[in-house]
Amino acid sequence: MDTREEISEHRTTAGRTAFHDPALKTYLQPTAAISSTVGAGDSAPPETGGQPEVASDTNDANVEVRELTFYLWIVSHVPKTTSQTQTRTSSVLGDFSDRMSDLLDYLLAHHWDALIGTTCSCSAADTQPTRTRTVTCHNCRQYTVSCEVCWLNAHKKAPTHWAQVWDPKSEFFVPHDISRLCDENKISASVNLGHGGDPCPHANSTIEFTLVEPNGVHSTRLRLCKCLNAPDRVAQLMRAGFFPATIREPSTAFSFELLKDFHMHHLESKKSAYDYMGAVVRLTDNVFTADISNPYEAFHRVVQVWGVLTARKRSGQALGIDALMPHRPKGSMRVYCPACPQPGFVKLPGSDQVPEELRCVPGRLSLLCLMTWISRHINQMAWTLDGNHHLNKYEKAGRSDPDSVSLWEGDGYIPEDAEYKAKMQHINATRGQQQKIEGDCDYLKAAQKQKFAKFKGLEVTGVVNCQCEHVFVLSSVDMHAGERTCYSDAALASAFFMYVPKGSGVPAEVLRGIENIGSYDMACITTVNLVKRFIDDYPELVPLVTKMRWGIPAVHCPNHKEQCWFEFGTTYLVCWCHFFGETAEHYWAGANQIGNFTRQMNAGHRHDVLNDHHGDWNWKKTIRLPGQLLSDLRDAKELFHSMRAAFLNLSVDFGSERTEEWNRLSRTFQRTDSGFNSVYRHEAKKLPSKDAVYQALMKDELHRAEAALRPIEGPLSVSFIGEGLKIRDAQRKCRQVVQETGRDHMESHAKEISLRRSKLVSRIGKWRRQQLEVMPSIADKLEATASADSESAIEDEVLWLPSDFSLEDRVRLNLTELASQEIYLREGEAYDAIRAIKSVTRQLDVLRRYQRDRARAQEQNSRALSEIHTAENTQDLHIAHYTETRVALIALGFIAEKDPNTQFPPLSRADTFRKATEDGRNVGDSRRPDGDAFIRAGVRAGQSSSGMRLEQPELGEGDKTSTRSSTINTDRQTGKKTKGQGWIWMPMGKGKMTDDDMRAWLEEGDRVQWFRAEAEMLRFKEQLEKREVEFLRVIDSHTKTSKVWQDLARQQERPGNAAYARRQAAMWSNMATDANGKLEKGGYSLLAEGEDIVSRVLSRRAEQDAYMREYLTQAGSDSRNPS
């Protein structure tokens, strides 16, 4: 390409880009438009002074060079639009689009070959007759067209490839089975078993046979070996790689490749046998599928057997592994979690020698010595129980096989069916068929309101699974009614029997050396009589359940009554690590997909399929476990350091005198005659919160429903209004992210906005449907909103809550009752916002003091300023929340906008000022009383609206806070009178509380905040230690499993068995090496010679203890001697 052509090509490309880009179009307008578009800060195009030079001679190369330069200048100066930013996917697809025509030509070319009709290469010898090329093979890569005889010779060991035979009349290839071809003797070919693909010399006949391969169904002819001592038909088929459909005179067989392919697709994509076989039939003939024999009936039986055989092979049961693993139940085909303790198999040095004083968890802590708070979590099994009603089974009277039994025979995750049913029938007969879970928890009441009519026509209503914290399935049992205690007990017992073989008693190592903790969404109820039930039903396991501790999953906990939050809340349970208890939900998303076809199966087949999927899930967890542990280690380390810094800063802020007094309190939950006591609870005494109001209104709704004042199935307006307020909160956060500066050019910012808006669209859509039920009178308003051609973003969409209407409209539309409920919730929401502002202001005091007094180097100063910026943005978000809530209360008529005595006055930056508690007394302090402030609301500092755990603040933008420690100057500095304390810190509602009461509120809020920060820190400290121990346990488990397979290989008499065992040994050894590499990547190492795990943990805790001592000592010294 010469210079002129190159210029033309570049100009054309630039012009095409400009034509399709709106931003470029503006730049390519006439001169005036261009001049107005280029900004003052932009450089002008070269040699044009900012204007394109008009060419007097279009053939002049110099002119074209200048034009090209001008075009390229435009392209480089125009801001890139979103449409110009191509992802790799769109770029690759664009490349394909450009070559689409060529690709189609290549595909169509396979339907013809230039060698068709020419002389075959086998005819070169004078002794051979002349044969023409008429047959090819599309299953072979780059197969050269040949004659039938050559094709047969080439496919002796691949007889199920389709022979593509050229039809001279129709002039296209027609697929033929091998039996349609003839050899050099004009004898029809066949699939030959034995003799390396050659026909047996003693076999004079063939049989009609159906072979099923991934490429289709072959109705062919089979020639068996008839030699002396030839094996039977089943053996010959298996040696040739075909699995017979029956044992007695099989006439259908499936290739191993087909079974492996289906098994993997079934496990990974949840494809049913029916759909898979339908695809195979269509691959045979995609037009006349009805003419193809569909072997589905035989196929679904064979894959059931294949799954069990595969499990027996992989578990080692086929090779006699029980002799080398006596600690496991005989015949067990389960995949065990290598990170959990495996008594009798994996034992880290020192893990069974934890001193007694370290096993016992004290009720009190020494703030400066955390070494005594240690070891339950080192040897700990953390399990979850959860029910699932999607994995049910239809009751098909007269159509189910009553003799159907599982081929796993109870050796998998599901107990043997006959024995299990007998056990449940006995329990139900003993305790009554209508046994119920009794209790007064709100969660139980909600669970019992489910419609039991949905179980009609079901033989099995669902399953209860027990899983470890690493999401390995331990056991699974059927439910034949609602979620009764007998089913959860059975799942728990079945999990224990993995380590405690039936009839052997509990091994001492299991009883003394391992702690068991469990999580169940109804733990507050089901654990009350757990030991008593096990004494009757599973007496050998009583020692284990007696010492077992229980928690409620973190997401479920807020739905329980307040007492459950603190008695079973996982954050407040010692040595619980960061086991939040919701891992049972991870498996259901995939398992629910197989429920669509297992509910139609016979009982035994259903259990086999579920066992197979449980085992495959566990195996995938096994191979991914080192990577997950590495990620968990890094997260735990980062979060522990963050939580430790937060706790230490609070300790400095509150002072040693207060924290030492608090530290003498017991962290143990205590039930009392009047309720309960917990250091993590801030008692709501006089002032409401949104949560307290919400729970009170919900209870009122339930009472009204029980009194038949309104149908229980009707919409609950309280929950509807509550969800609407939560959506408003999500809209506000989304607006803040959209307006956030500094990130607006980043791709992550655009993705975050898109994700938040997508969630809002889904959430508002669901809420709108409920709104039509609760507020039918505004249907026209909703319809107008939906049909309006508005360009406003989803975060700005009006929800049409009662506060969005005028008083007259609320009366006309019959929204007065809803308005009163919104008032209650809005009032609590305002108190919540005030509490949040107070909490973050306290944090700002500490952060600003640190930045002022201790941040010296650039890195420290930058990090401190970044933390301050984050806290300021978070406070702005809470101020915006309060302001929006106040506006709504004014619209609802609850408060007057200009009432000077309102409990919710306008909130400005000055109103957030407070005296920093870490500062000494200042001039004028006696005239500025301390913030006896948390009077407006029961302070649950750092707490989410669910009342459960500390959360990192949301990031945001907005005005900056004025505080005594930074932006508020003293009299000496400014010569002006120092600002007074903000109203949010001042006592309000006089007459309700005395000054002493208000100071008690403030003290209690600080105490709760401190204890919760301590709990968060300890949980992540335990998590960090536990994950390291589990990493070491995984490596040890893989190494010992490899050795077991090596020993197993030496015991095998058959070479194939020994080779398979050696292969498994190498696999486990490689997995151990990989896990060790990931451990080192995380900055950890294996235990050194003579080192034990307890010593390592104690050594690290001593270092952490020394760090905390030094930090608190230095901070105390800095407070006494401010710079």
Image (cartoon, grey):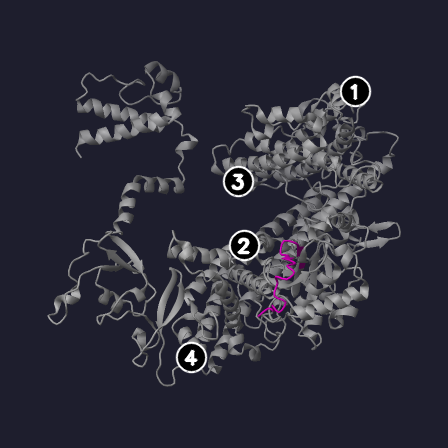
**Cα–Cα gap, marks 4 and 3:** 83 Å
Report the residue marked by disc 3: 858
Report the residue marked by disc 2: 631
How far across and how far down the image is residue 40, in percent?
Answer: 40, 19
The magenta span reads 384-407
**Amino acid at circle 1:** Asp
811, 852: nearer the viewer: 811
Specify which label sits upstream in the sequence, 2 or 1: 2
Position above or below: 384 against 240? above
Report the residue marked by disc 1: 899
Specify which label sits upstream in the sequence, 2 or 4: 4
957, 1060: nearer the viewer: 1060
Does the image show residue 651?
Answer: yes
Report the residue marked by disc 4: 232
Q: Secondary structure at mark 3?
A: helix
Q: Residues within 10 Å of mark 4 (few under 14, many from 20)?
A: few
Q: Secondary structure at mark 2?
A: helix
Does the image show residue 513?
Answer: no
